[in-house]
Image (cartoon, rainbow, N blue to C red):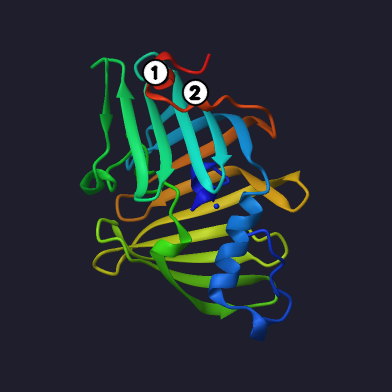
Amino acid sequence: MRFLLRFSAFLLITLPLTAHAQTSASDVFEEVERRQDLVDTESASIQMEIVDERGRTRTRSLDVRSKTDGDRLKSILIFTGPADIRGTGLLTVETDDGDDQKLYLPALGRVQRIAGSKRGERFAGSDFTYEDLGTRDPDAYDVTMAETTDAAFVLDARPTDGDSKYSRIVLTVDRARYVVLRAEHYDRGGALAKVLTADDFTEVAPGAWRADTLMMEDVQAGRRTVLTFTERATGTTLRDDLFSERQLQRGLR
């Protein structure tokens, strides 16, 4: 979902979301997306902390830019440090046929496309996969309401894409802000694989909230990756040519 591509963490209509009985799972899913789309551009600097199964920690920094062009989302991510990963980048462009993702590795000096079969691989050694960083079109999921409470909706989203690493994703959505607080990812065998939690929300535009802290925990491997936003700006002008292979190789600074 777009809360991940924009690291916060995904209709210009008003949905009837006040009464439990009147609210469908698709209503909630689309409202989360609609509120993400209230901000059409975003720039951010992020600290990434990777903690492996032995408790060893690696810290990295990265810059992200994203832009909604019509109803299509584009994003570019570039690592700024440390030296061994600086310049590595990922470009994601939403198309009619799904996400077009391209990876740039400075050591190889070339751009490579991420094939559908590789979308389940870890991105840059973190606990986020290429699939996790994609747009995840709501139409590519069968979504049902698992539970409703006064505080949250719980949705069961099952990917229809055969390339997905997951059999289902269980989303806990805050009723007041329509943000995803927790996303449980189940593997193809039905076992819990990873849990994403979001915290420290900021209202970046009326009705649009972004998480300043995201943690993806790989419960099977016993490791986790924490993303902390150190800077963020929304609604600024971003050139279209920023989201290109040329820019991917040049970096953002």
Residue 180 seen from this side: no
Q: Quadrant of residue 213?
A: top right
Residue found at x 55% / y 79%: 147
Residue 241: mark in rendering: 2
The answer to whether 197 is drawn above or below residue 244 in the figure is below
Name the mark on residue 246: 1
Callout 1 environment at 10 Å: few (<14), some (14 to 19), or many (20+)?
Answer: few
Q: Position of residue 112 (x, y in %)?
A: 25, 29
* Residue type, label 2: Asp
Position of residue 209 measured from the top left corner of the image (x, y, whole percent):
69, 49
- Precedes in sequence: disc 2 or disc 1: 2
Is there CB contact under 8 Å for labels 2 and 1? yes
Q: Examine the rendering and report whether any part of residue 234 can be seen.
A: yes
Q: Is residue 4 left or right of residue 221?
A: right
Compute the Cα span from label 2 to label 1: 8 Å
The residue sitting at the right extreme is 206
Q: Secondary structure at mark 1?
A: helix
For mark 2, give the secondary structure.
helix
Q: Choose top left, top right, bottom left or bottom right for residue 236.
A: top right
Q: Amino acid under label 1? A: Arg
5 and 216: which is toward the camera: 5
Q: In this view, which residue lies farthest toward the bottom?
A: 21
Up/down of 188 relative to 112, above or below: below
Residue 60 percent across, percent down from the top left: 45, 25
Q: Which residue shows up at 48% across the image and 60% down it?
A: 183
Measured as percent of width and height from the top left, residue 211 is found at 62, 46
Q: In the figure, residue 161 lies in which quadrant?
A: bottom left
